[in-house]
Amino acid sequence: MKKFLNIIPRVFVVPLFVLGGIIIGLGVYTAYVARLHSYATDEPSACINCHIMVPYYQSWEKSSHREWAHCNDCHVPQDNFVNQYAFKAADGLYHAAVFTFKNEPPSIRPRYASKGVIMENCVRCHTQLTTEFIKTGRMSYSQVTKGEGKVCWDCHRDIPHTMVSSLAASPNAIAPLPASPVPAWLKEMIKK
C-alpha cells in the first residue's frame, strides 16, 4: 500500500481516499436500498421488491402452489447450491438491467433458460404423478424444443400464475409492501 501511495503525488492522496469512500458508501447504500440481501433468501416477498412482480406474487399467493412451493422452488435450479445461486444472480442482473433501463415488457414471460428450469422443477415435484399415474414419463425441456412433447404449462397454463398476470391486466393487485429501507432515526429526524 505504501508503494502505491508513494507513486501518487501527495496532493491527490486525500482526495483519492475521499472519492473511494464516496464510491464505496454509495455502493453500500444502493445495495441496502435495493434490499440486495433479501435476494439471498427463499422468501417470496423478495420478488416484489420490483413493483412489476406484484401481479405474479398475487397470482401465486392465491394458487394451490402457495402452501407447497415458493418462487425459488420453481424458478431456480434445485440440483445444487452453486447452480442455484449462480442462476439467481444471472437472472437477477438481467432483471435489474431491464428494469433500470425501463425496458420491461407489459407481461413478463420466462426466457429460454428459465423455461428449462421451470420444466425440470415441475417434473421434480410431480415425479410420481408423471411416472406412475399418468405415465407421461420424465420429459426434459430439450425434448420439448425438439418437438417430442409439450411443456407442462401448455395444458396447465393457469398454474400457478394466470396467463393474464401483468400490471395492465391486474391494476389493483395487492401484495405486502417491502419494509422501508429508511432507518428509524432518519424517519424521526425528517418528522421534526
Image: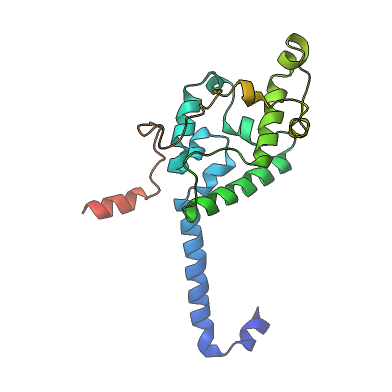
Vertical order, 85 against 9 (above or below):
above
Please state which of residues 17 and 51 is positioned toward the viewer in this rendering.
Answer: 51
Which residue: 51% across, 21% down?
A: 63
The color scheme shown is rainbow
Please state which of residues 98 and 17 is positioned toward the viewer in this rendering.
Answer: 98
Vertical order, 128 against 50 (above or below):
above
Which residue: 78% across, 22% down?
A: 138
Q: Quadrant of residue 176?
A: top left
Q: Quadrant of residue 7?
A: bottom right
Residue 38 x %, y % = 52, 43
Vertical order, 7 against 148 (above or below):
below
Residue 110 x %, y % = 60, 38
In the rendered image, the residue lying farthest to the front is 147
Residue 35 x %, y % = 48, 47
Vertical order, 169 against 186 (above or below):
above
> Viewed as shown, does residue 14 lie left or right of 76?
left
Which residue: 61% across, 34% down?
A: 72
Please state which of residues 30 and 47 is positioned toward the viewer in this rendering.
Answer: 47
